[in-house]
Amino acid sequence: MSGDCCEHTLLVDDPRLKLVERAMKRLQYQPDALIEVLHTAQEAFGYLSRDLLSHVAAQLKLPESQVFGVATFYHFFTLRPKGEHSCIVCTGTACYVKGAGEILNTLEQAAGIKAGQTTADGRLSLGTARCLGNCSLAPMITIDDTVYGPEKPEGAVDKLNRLLEVPHEQG
Amino acid sequence: MNRVELAELAETVTAQQQSCRLRLLVCCGTPCVAAGAEAVVAALREKLAALGNPADLELVGTGCQGPCSRGPLLTVLRPGQPEQVWQKTTPELAVSILEAELQQAPVPDENLLPADWPFFTRQTRLVLANSGRIDPENLEQYIACGGYESLAQVLHDMTPDQACDSVVQSGLRGRGGGGYPTGLKWQLVRKGSGSRKFIVANGDEGDPGAYMDRSLMESDPHRILEGIAIAGYAIGAEQGYIYVRGEYPVAAQRLRKAIKDAERAGLLGSRVLDSSFSFRIDIRIGAGAFVCGEETALLASIMGRRGQPRIRPPYPAEAGLWGCPTLINNVETFGNIPSIFSIGPQAFNAIGNGKSRGTKVFALCGEVVNNGLIEVPMGIPLREIVFEIGGGLANGAAFKAAQTGGPSGGCIPAEKLDTPVDYENLQALGSIMGSGGLIVMGEQSCMVDVARFFMEFCLDESCGKCVPCRTGTVEIYRLLSRICNGSASQRDLQTLEQLCQMVKDTSLCGLGAAAPNPVLSTLRWFRAEYEAHVSQRRCPAGVCTMDQLPLHLLGEQLLQRIAALRCDGEGY
């Protein structure tokens, strides 16, 4: 468990933590609201660190095992930091039938990582989705939440390269 | 707001819309936005601003208009004239249409869709009646379409029992795939003991290749709220939840806004429409687990736990959320409810075929010319959907199969194209109606590979609680992989069939019980393709690469090598 999870010391005056605290207060610290709280936490921090999960468990008076159980059960939650940019290849049925596999292979080669991984420099996370519900655009990809489709392998790589050419935002 | 005020508001807004000499409806569904709809809206807005924003010209950003692969779509409405729809609209084209209209010159017919286009004329739109016609974030436009009138009617003219009876009479069945009679379910929950009852609208659309629920929630959120509120009155609940899939942030945001607007207008919240009925709706966001489409897993997830199903009975109708009687219906089912009361249960029941009444929304995708969202009467032949509404296969390719029901469904072969599409007939073919994904596949799709694709999905999405599903899906996937890479034997094919039957019979919930369906249905209709993979080590569709050898061939090869080594002394 701890191997999959990143340590991250929480600071009391971290504004992101305040967002999470506010959400828990609004939901009256009800254990039933765990998934809502985790959504807020992931939105604020980008991922769920071990300390964050322990903190949520303590606040909602839930066993840590249950909080970890929920956080690892759902695909949406990630226990590792994501890259600066994200590219998701939809592998739903329509996209699959129309060649999503080829797009994914090409992107994996171009980025040098497998789906579900983040590049060593933290610039890019590559992922797949079960179906993003844009089947009429099949095969489709999203880059930082913008939808592109119907896509071709070369076009997808071009888009990714253009994105990564822009230097790091925070310098 | 009371009933009279509701009717007055509907009249005022309708009159105002009719006084417009021109209404421009630009589809702002995700596919159209990806194709550039925002630029079209901006160009039209700029043009209207330049004209001084005249009151008789209206620009509306709507939800999904249907033929999603042809976006951006622009619908033009003029009082007393047939509407016109343009496909692949550019900002320049949109402005030139507007200019021509203003000068009463002939409009450009470039990209204009024909008025008798079967994609539109063959549909019967009840659930999608307002989709693509109204701004989904505008409550008044929904009211102008007769919105919340059904709720007012139920609250003021009917007892809860009468409301349940009407749904029974309509013949509506669950649109999430199961097909359980909705009215019966309502009556069960109504009779359930306990002072508190809950309603859950299942918007956790997990089937890959299906986006009906997403589109409905994004295009006409108030319709779902109205349907849930009617159900609340009918079964005696005061609280409802809509469980929205985590991948659909826009749907969640629109539903949230719709709830807030409806509460402010007195159409939800306490004393709805000045009656004694109070009802609240909250949104719950899913976190990405296909199994949460199963009702007991869905309930666990709403209560903040791992979405794992439990043994039924007790059914949620007796013991659901926090042990209270709970009504769970799909959002499309709730979308049907306002129509049942506006057109009357008899009229609703008059549409359809056999035991399947009303209409069904399908996401028509894959190798078909017209991709998009359609609503058709139950019992329509599959051929009509694929070849008339869908316009046949792209590039004139031959039809091979239609996949319905996603990972729980099956593939329908070409010889069954004339089957009426309804619950019973699809089941007889080894597929299911499912939530409404309909993927058309041509000759270049390998059926074994498709079955493997769905099995990979199921093994990944299995929650791990029961053994047949957790390990069975993995074993089936391994067998299918061997068939695809050329290393399977005839015996593997037999094992595959036995294993499928076992997983189907012994899994705890619907996910496992239905997971073998894609394999079983392709085995049934496309057995020759499996045989070709196994006995000839050949993929007829040319998809699979046969780079492995079956055991007996490996053995033979080994013997040959040994023999060669002995005879001529050459080593390997």
Image (cartoon, helix red, strand yellow):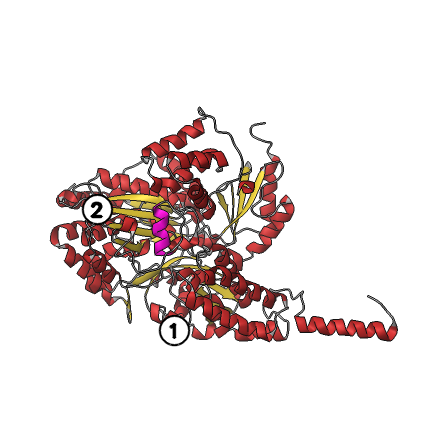
| B306 over B525 or under it: above or below | above
Q: Chain of mark 1?
A: B
Residue at the limit of the structure toward the top, as seen here: A13
Examine the residues drawn in magenta and state their main secondary structure: helix
**Residue B248 rendering spot, x and y as whole percentages:** 41, 46
**Residue B566 rendering spot, x and y as whole percentages:** 85, 74
Answer yes or no: is residue B82 visible. no
Q: Residue at x 46, y 34 (%)?
A: A52
Residue A140 versus residue B201: which sits nearer the camera?
B201
Instruction: Give yes or no for residue A149 being in the magenta stretch.
Output: no
Callout 2: SS? loop
**Residue B536 rendering spot, x and y as whole percentages:** 64, 75
Q: Residue at x 21, y 41 (%)?
A: B269
Q: Taking A99 as reference, is B364 left or right?
A: left
> Where on the picture, by quarter, is residue B483?
bottom right
Q: Chain of mark 2?
A: B
The answer to which of marks 1 and 2 sits earlier in the sequence is 2
- Start and end of the magenta stretch? B294-303
Pointer 2: what residue?
B238
Pointer 1: what residue?
B428
Instruction: Give yes or no for residue B302 being in the magenta stretch.
Output: yes
Q: Residues within 10 Å of mark 2 (few under 14, many from 20)?
A: some
